[in-house]
Amino acid sequence: MLVVGAGDQAAESVIALSENNRVTMAVRGPELSRPRTRNISILKSKQVRGEIVILYDTTVTSINENSVTLKTPDGLREIPNDRTIINAGSRAPYDFLGKVGVKIADTWNSRRYIFFAIFIAFIISMYLFKSFGMKALLGHYGLKSAAEISNPVLSFLAAKWYGVLYTLLVGGFGLWILNGKRKRHYRLHDYIRWKTISCIFFQTVFLFGLTLMPVKYLGAKAATLITVWPLTLAPASWANSFFVMGNSNPELVFYTFFTVFLAFIAMPVFVYFHGKRCCSWICGCGALAETFGEPFRRLAPKGYISRRRERIIYVVLTASVLMTGMIVLKNTAVSAPAVNSVQYWYNIIVYLIFSGIIGVGMYPFFGARIWCRYLCPLAAYMNLLGAVLSKYKISSNDRCIDCGQCNRYCEMGIDIKGFALRQESFSVKNTPCIACGECIALCPMDVLTFGDRPG
Ligand code: SF4
Ligand code: SF4
């Protein structure tokens, strides 16, 4: 008998059939890497004992009545054969299913394209309103700013409506998760509970709360407490004022050195212990993704091509580093007007367009982590830090049943199942894992854990 394939199904077919048959296994690649470790070792010992034949780099060219012809590295080879079992190919026959009337969730049809266009238009108008609309609205009533509105509640909402809406979404959907309303979880895992509480806390008290504090208590540059270079380029302007222009205002000096400490000491130490956990526990974009973005988790792009596209994040990081250099050297090596005009477009592209449209606008279509996976310069910086100095990892035992739940709900598109089947650990060194813990909470076999898991 011939078994074609290189995954667990093929391996288990070979193991079962070889009890009563002479079996050849045709593997397209140069090695068996996809089956779980236990199956690989059974196959290899059967091969050593001569009970089965495994042919690598081999494909089937024809299946005849009593034989098969195989293309091997040594040329065409015909072997006697009674039955052929094909255990290859993981894509369901969607075209056929569609023709017989089966509706497939999340496929792109004309309705979905129209919804996509309408939703993007809505998000663009929200961002335009955030940037220009409120001023125009106030101007319409003869007011210059929200502070001129006499009613304190309306004045507050006019000034902070975007932050209020954002915080309400994080808080509302966070409470929905804490309430155990997500049916797909077997239980509300403690890690998910604390992660959600952390997201609500940091968004409400720290990120939004700090913007409500009077400037006199915090200083004009308090934004540094909530954003880190290279996500914000504000530290570059302060470094320019301090180092190049000689401005030694104590507040400026404090914030300049504080941001340097945050980016080059605090972040590496954090990544060493926790990997990219700040993306799922602390960051405001991450908080929205973990709460409001929760229902869209399964829509995240998966597979090799989507992982390759993630490399664009290093182009964004490079742009951010170059911009930083230009701003720090403003008025010396580069002229101020040139820096100002480049920075103007940089800000528009990176922060306004991408964080707005490609961020929230993509949630119902591509999951909530498009910004984090493809465009966030801070995530790219943490990827590089994690590649050299993180002790964070997720490891697995030997109980994986290949159900695919972990892959389905990983927003970072990581092939967790592949690691679990091979009982390999993974970390920020070889994946963009943000330590959201969803794979651990969802696994029905309790396969995965943070840190080491022997046996
Ligand atoms: S691998 Fe697990 S913990 Fe890491 S991002 Fe994916 S689901 Fe979250
Ligand atoms: S959820 Fe658990 S059992 Fe299912 S594929 Fe992932 S690691 Fe394996």
Image (cartoon, rainbow, N blue to C red):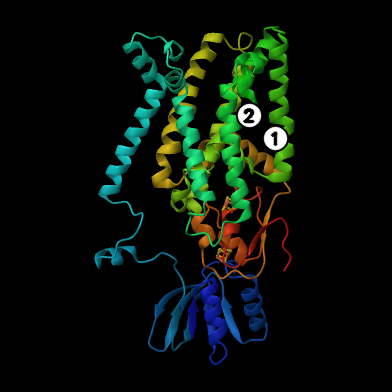
Q: Residue at x 38, y 84 (%)?
A: 64
Q: Residue at x 52, y 67 (%)?
A: 403
Residue in the foreground of this view, choosing between 111 and 198: 198
Q: Residues within 10 Å of mark 1 (few under 14, many from 20)?
A: many
When the figure is inspected, residue 2 is found, relative to residue 248, above or below; the finding is below
Q: Which residue is mark 2?
A: 228
Amino acid at circle 1: Met
Judged from the image, the secondary structure of the residue bearing numbered disc 1 is helix
Q: Quadrant of residue 247?
A: top right
When the figure is inspected, residue 261 is found, relative to residue 189, above or below; the finding is above
Using the rendered image of the protein, determine whether residue 435 is visible from the camera's viewpoint.
no
When the figure is inspected, residue 376 is found, relative to residue 332, above or below; the finding is below
Q: Which residue is mark 1?
A: 267
Amino acid at circle 2: Val
In the rendered view, does 258 fall on the left or right side of 69? Answer: right
Q: Residue at x 61, y 46 (%)?
A: 195
Using the rendered image of the protein, determine whether residue 15 is visible from the camera's viewpoint.
yes
Judged from the image, the secondary structure of the residue bearing numbered disc 2 is loop
Which of pointers 1 and 2 lies earlier in the amino acid sequence? Answer: 2
- Whether tag 1 and tag 2 are in contact, CB under 8 A, the answer is yes
Q: Quadrant of the C terminus?
A: bottom right
Find the distance from the CA under tag 1 to the CA under tag 2.
9 Å
